Image (cartoon, rainbow, N blue to C red):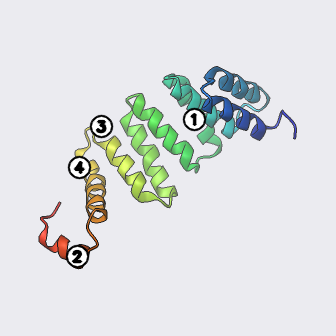
Amino acid sequence: MSRDNAEDIVRRATAAFNAGRHDEAIGLCERGLVRDPGEPMLNHLLAAVRFAKGEIAPACTHIETSLARRPDNVAARLLAARIARAGGEFDAALTHLDRAIALSRSAMSLSRRRARSSWPAGKRKRARPGRRSSRSSRSIRKQPQGSAGWRGRMATSPPP
């Protein structure tokens, strides 16, 4: 396998990133992007590394470049939402989360993320459904499985 292959560069950059060698990961991604400036995998990884270093503006640029080539990438949408939220752009974060929810099969956990982003954005009414579903699903899981089962317990307990 050629060392110039984008997938190989992503593997090596990911290994460097996971080992805490952020500058090496950035260098690998940037060298790969010289060859193919729009490569979505490299832009996504470079955005993640920049975000981990606290460099919000460059991270935003790279994740938007990645999304321009692969707009239906759920992982990229989630990273874009985290970057936007860290930059104080709550409406953009909610837009990315809405798109990720629409694309994802695990919409429940994504709805919780959306609720967590809605709350600090001042959109309390939009946050409540996610917060309620999160709370009620936790209470069901914690119910004892004794002779009465969880139904008997839920009938006597007050609503959440």
Inter-mark Cα distance, 2 to 1: 46 Å
Give the vertical position of 155 relative to 93 (above or below).
Answer: below
Callout 2: SS: helix
The residue positioned farthest toward the right in the image shown: 2
The CA span between labels 1 and 4 is 29 Å
Return the residue nearer the eye: 139 or 53: 139
Q: Quadrant of the N terminus?
A: top right
Label 2 – label 3 distance at C-alpha: 37 Å
Q: Which residue is mark 1?
A: 63
Disc 3, SS? loop
Q: Residue at x 65, y 43 (%)?
A: 69
Q: Position of residue 81 (x, y in %)?
A: 45, 39
Identify the mark nearer the N-term, 1 or 4: 1
Label 3 is placed on what type of residue? Ala
Q: Is residue 137 above or below residue 17?
A: below
Mark 2–mark 4 CB contact (< 8 Å): no
Residue identified by numbered label 4 = 125
In space, the residues marked 3 and 4 are separated at their CA atoms by: 11 Å
